[in-house]
């Protein structure tokens, strides 16, 4: 063997040894890293809704959780419990803020007792906006920053995502049709949020109860009348069993939406990618909820008439006008007492003036088209 060949062989051995050491080192690092990764595993979050398990609202909460669980590929898993599983419905904010729960699903009006301005997210006429327009104000008109300011003012350690625009809610379920505003005087009535003040101003004796307790209270005579939300929820909760009269259309909760909230510390500890999924999943779930609501609410509305023999009536315009007048008085009083309330009202009014002008001028009324196809004088369509 020549000297040159010996030197080449030696060089190759040295190079091979170096490569082996590099591979061995990488393998050792992977061996060390792999158990740590396995130990980390998925992040689990325990949520509670403010709704009974049978309510479609609890289903909406589960829909959001499923979207998150699917989109994160199992890296984050949200479990949703029904109202009362850990805390009563009206104690959700406190439980999430303290970390007793990782998050929750409800409505902002349920926190009315802690800061009354929170109820401006949906508990009232929305200044002629519907719920989708109010969500537009929240995202693009300054509402998000004002909500963060509100929660900070009461020391709530939460991150909030309003989502899921609700259709206009009925005035409620009554023993007989409401024909004038005075018919509400002395009525033992259930509602929540600013609507407490509005119906009190109209002469009702108001009692705020969570959704799961309303029908029982009506059955026992503790309530004469009540409002909750929609055809599907009202039906499954048993309203047709205690009343056969439902008054449709109202300004008391004309623009309400749901709220998904997280404990702020636990939310901030998540990777940025997961936080982005939580945010975008709320918007996706909100749109899906709106579509599901149209399908399910219309079915239950039809069946309550055909199977449950419920009579639906339109709330008289005189009652609606009185609601607006009383709401303005309530808002003026609370604005004088609460600077944040005033700031939110002014922000909503400014956005609503522009947005509703655009809507009124642009969006065609569908009443004519409805009458054309389905009204009493409509020609039978093949």
Image (cartoon, rainbow, N blue to C red):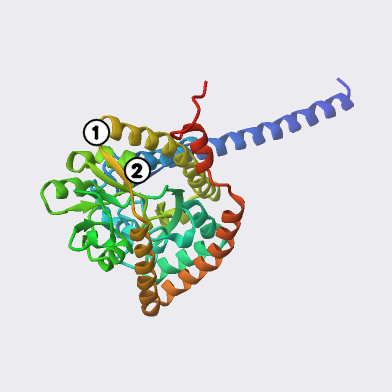
Tell me residue 45's x, y (percent).
38, 45
Q: Determine the residue positioned at 15% across, 50% down.
A: 217
Which residue is denoted by mark 1 in the rendering? 308
Q: Earlier in the sequence, mark 2 or mark 1?
A: 2
Tag 1's secondary structure? Answer: loop
| Drawn side of residue 217 relative to residue 77, left or right | left
Determine whether 157 is above or below 316 in the image: below
For mark 2, does the 10 Å Cα neighbourhood hold few (<14), some (14 to 19), or many (20 or more) residues?
A: many
Q: Is the N terminus in the top left, top right, bottom left or bottom right quadrant? A: top right
Which residue is denoted by mark 2 in the rendering? 57
Determine whether 33 is above or below 130 in the image: above
Tag 2's secondary structure? Answer: helix
| Drawn side of residue 169 relative to residue 127, left or right | left
| Drawn side of residue 8 relative to residue 203, left or right | right
Tell me residue 301's x, y (percent).
34, 36
For mark 1, does the 10 Å Cα neighbourhood hold few (<14), some (14 to 19), or many (20 or more) residues?
A: some
* Mark 2 or 1, closer to the camera: 1
> Image quadrant of residue 326?
bottom left
Q: Determine the residue positioned at 36% across, 74% down.
A: 334
Tell me residue 297's x, y (percent).
38, 38
Q: Nearer the viewer, residue 115 or 20?
A: 115
> Image quadrant of residue 90?
bottom left
Determine whether 282 is above or below 203 in the image: above
> Marks 1 and 2: in contact by CB < 8 Å?
no
Mark-to-mark CA distance, 2 and 1: 21 Å
Decide if residue 7 is in sight here: yes
């Amino acid at each position: 063997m020549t000297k040159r060949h010996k030197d080449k062989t030696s060089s190759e051995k040295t190079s091979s040894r170096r490569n082996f050491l590099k591979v061995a080192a990488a393998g050792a690092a992977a061996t060390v890293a792999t158990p740590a990764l396995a130990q980390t595993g998925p992040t689990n979050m325990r949520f509670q809704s403010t709704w009974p398990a049978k309510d479609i609202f609890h289903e909406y909460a589960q829909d959001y959780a499923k979207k998150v669980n699917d989109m994160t590929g199992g890296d984050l898993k949200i479990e949703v419990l029904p109202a009362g599983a850990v805390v009563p419905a009206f104690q959700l904010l406190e439980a999430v803020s303290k970390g007793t729960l990782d998050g929750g699903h409800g409505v902002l009006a349920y926190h009315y007792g802690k800061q009354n301005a929170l109820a401006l997210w949906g508990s009232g006429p929305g200044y002629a906006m519907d719920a989708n327009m109010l969500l537009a104000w929240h995202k693009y008109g300054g509402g998000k920053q004002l909500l963060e300011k509100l929660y900070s003012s009461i020391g709530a350690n939460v991150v909030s995502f309003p989502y899921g625009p609700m259709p206009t809610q009925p005035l409620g379920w009554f023993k007989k049709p409401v024909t004038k505003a005075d018919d509400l005087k002395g009525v033992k009535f259930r509602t929540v949020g600013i609507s407490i003040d509005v119906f009190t101003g109209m002469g009702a004796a108001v009692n705020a109860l969570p959704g799961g307790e309303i029908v029982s209270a009506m059955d026992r005579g503790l309530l004469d009348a009540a409002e909750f939300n929609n055809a599907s929820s009202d039906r499954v909760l048993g309203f047709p069993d205690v009343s056969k009269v439902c008054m449709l259309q109202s300004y008391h909760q004309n623009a309400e939406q749901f709220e998904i909230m997280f404990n702020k510390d636990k939310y901030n500890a998540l990777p940025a990618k997961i936080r982005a999924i939580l945010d975008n999943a709320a918007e996706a779930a909100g749109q899906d909820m709106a579509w599901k609501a149209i399908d399910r609410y219309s079915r239950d509305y039809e069946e309550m008439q055909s199977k449950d023999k419920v009579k639906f009536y339109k709330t008289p315009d005189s009652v609606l006008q009185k609601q607006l007048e009383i709401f303005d008085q309530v808002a003026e009083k609370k604005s004088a007492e609460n600077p944040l309330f005033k700031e939110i009202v002014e922000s909503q009014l400014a956005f609503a003036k522009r947005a509703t002008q655009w809507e009124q001028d642009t969006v065609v009324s569908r009443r004519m088209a409805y009458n054309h196809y389905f009204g009493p004088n409509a020609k039978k369509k093949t």
